[in-house]
């Protein structure tokens, strides 16, 4: 999975309230990048992190340690 797929999922009006689906996509992306992220993904990562923070503040997603 690449950062663009994650961003499409986050930005889509169709998945706006599918919080678990967004969270799972982010987790999958991070697992695939366990050795680090690519430099050209930094801007997209910023948007992903901002989305995570927003969803956590809204209480729609909980943190699960796996």
Image (cartoon, rainbow, N blue to C red):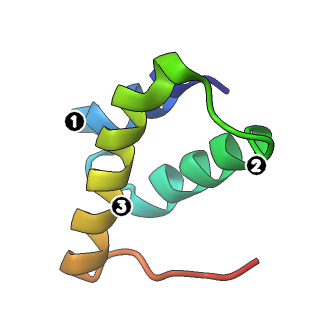
Expressed as whole percent of the image width and height from the top left, the position of residue 46 reads 33, 41
Q: Earlier in the sequence, mark 3 or mark 2?
A: 2
The residue singled out by tag 3 in the image is 52
Residue 13, numbered label: 1
Give the position of the C terminus as an image quadrant.
bottom right
Residue at the (51%, 58%) spot, across then down: 23
Q: What kind of element bears circle 1?
A: helix
* Apparent side of residue 9 relative to residue 14 in the rendered image (left or right): right
Q: Position of residue 64 (x, y in %)?
A: 61, 82
Q: In which quarter of the image is residue 11?
A: top left
User: Does the CB distance between marks 1 and 3 fall below 8 Å?
Assistant: no
Q: How far apart are marks 3 and 2 (CA)?
A: 16 Å
Q: How crowded is mark 1: few (under 14 residues within 10 Å), some or many (20 or more)?
A: few
Tell us which disc is closer to us: 1 or 2: 2
Give the residue pinned by disc 2: 31
Front-most of residues 38 and 13 = 38
Q: Quadrant of the N terminus?
A: top right
* Lower sequence index among marks 1 and 2: 1
Res. 36 mark = none
**Marks 1, 3: nearer the viewer:** 3
Q: Distance between the residues labelled 1 and 2?
A: 25 Å
Above-or-below relation of 51 to 41? below
Q: Residue 37: x, y in percent?
A: 63, 33
């Amino acid at each position: 999975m690449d950062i663009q797929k994650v961003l499409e999922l986050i930005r889509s009006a169709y998945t706006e309230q599918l919080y678990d689906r967004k969270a799972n996509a982010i987790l999958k992306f991070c697992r695939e990048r366990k050795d680090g992220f690519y430099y050209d993904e930094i801007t997209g990562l910023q948007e992903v992190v901002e989305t995570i923070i927003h969803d956590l503040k809204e209480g729609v997603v909980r943190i699960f340690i796996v």
